Amino acid sequence: MANNSEYVIEMLHITKEFPGIKANDDITLQLKKGEIHALLGENGAGKSTLMSVLFGLYQPEEGIIKKDGVEVKINNPNDATALHIGMVHQHFKLVDVFTVLDNIILGAEDTKFGFLQKKEARKKVKELSDKYGLYVDLDAKVEDITVGMQQRTEILKMLYRDNEILIFDEPTAVLTPQEIEELMQIMKNLAKEGKSILFISHKLNEIMEVADRVTVLRRGKYVDTVNTADTNKQELSNMMVGRPVQLQVTKDEAKPTDVVLDIKDMCVYNEIHKKDAVHNVTMQVRKGEIVCIAGIDGNGQTEFIHGLTGLSKITGGTVKICGKDITKASIAGKSENMSHIPEDRHKHGLVLDFTLENNMVLQRFQDKEFQNHGFIRFDNVRKYAEDLIEQFDVRSGQGPITIARSMSGGNQQKAIIARELDRNKALVVAVQPTRGLDVGAIEYIHSQLVKQRDEGKAVLLVSLELEEVMSLSDRILVMYEGEIVAECDPKKVTAQELGLYMAGAKRQDKEDKEVAGA
């Protein structure tokens, strides 16, 4: 063993338990000074738990943490900050109504005679943003800036506190391809300046690009630590999942038949910005095809789906499913006609404090199968949930009685997908169905969506992942500022060209779209 000072952080034999599950089972992780060290594992492998232990959000049952070779106690995030450890969480912790500058200095304010020294703070933040290429508008309110900018704000927040050890938890889950490239560059710059980075991810190409070493966890246990230079994507995915994984989507040619979803000139209003976020969208999805709406986050995709599923008001145009006009139908009426895998699984997909079994029958508890004269038939609900849990490999500490909130993000997502696909509707609307998921779960969900297509369902996919858009869809519609600006054939279009449409640098006129759609 090299002398202790080689490692800036050592987590030795960490064990952390929750009811029914050992989230971390005797895990050792060592971070060298100035390296980018990736933490790789499936959803629920224990990556976020381990980082939460390091950041003082959880106390481990066993094991010790050393900083620069000396054992330390981290009882809460303030202790972590005092040790110069900072963390960018997967779901950002920013105050929406504050400006970027106020968010950065929040909790670490410089005061003189009780007055906030904003001028000094602004100067320091400005220097940091120049040094690391983290450009943000310091006076913009967080609610008005893009997700990529929010992330830069989080990074500046860490640097402002002079943090030396930076934890990034799934930092690219919500970014566009261009923003991801910029973030990779920023991370390399930070490491060059001597910062030590722990990078949680399950995106293998990103890990191969930026990380010096990778530690792999599987089901709460330590698998191995390897140098990225000595490994490859296939090898890493096998270590992570414990079996060979198909990294490419396999599917036959689509054979589309009748129109299922028929949208004409649809407009959807955005309450916050007090204007239409979706303008005159016209499109069709037929049985036996996967149509993908691609675009950069914040270009009206969310409002479009909210209009379609009844969460927002449609202010113009018509929506028909299988010939039936549902434009003015209630949420329940719309839900009757489609399966919907929502973008925000916490807000619109699950009731987090319900058990898994109750979440599985959310839209169906009135079915004869699950109720008798207004009384829920709990034995049937449990049996149904158990079947779905097994069929879709949903992992949780206590099976059907697990509280949804305590499950890992990937397993929450699998539960929603199990419930929605089993409802067996003609139209499947899947919004970011693999966001934040690992290769094993992605492979599974992709194969399920292709299976739905091959069974004659119409699948409408909304995705921000270019790779997913290219490999899963049969037709691609690009949405920019609430309009469909291009229709492309995934077999013919390049990722670069698609990127230009997504950024609004290029658009097709009517004739081109008709050719592409023909």
Image: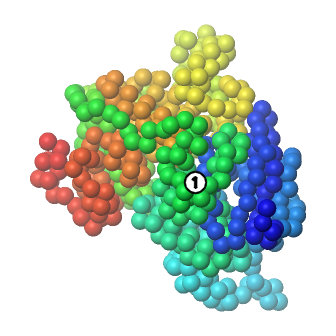
Quadrant of residue 4 in the image? bottom right
Q: Nearer the viewer, residue 289 or 377?
A: 289
* Residue 138 left/right relative to 355: left
Q: Amino acid at mark 1?
A: Ser
* Residue 218 left/right relative to 53: left
Q: Nearer the viewer, residue 337 or 27?
A: 27
* Residue 385 left/right relative to 315: right
The reply to whether residue 396 is in sight is yes
- Please name the residue shown 78% across and 57% down the image: 11
Residue picked out by circle 1: 201
The image position of residue 75, as x and y in percent, is 86, 59
The image position of residue 257, as x and y in percent, is 21, 27
- Please name the residue shown 82% across and 89% down the image: 113
* Residue 35 left/right relative to 439: right
The reply to whether residue 207 is in sight is no
Q: Nearer the viewer, residue 488 or 261?
A: 488
- Please name the residue shown 18% across and 44% down the image: 517
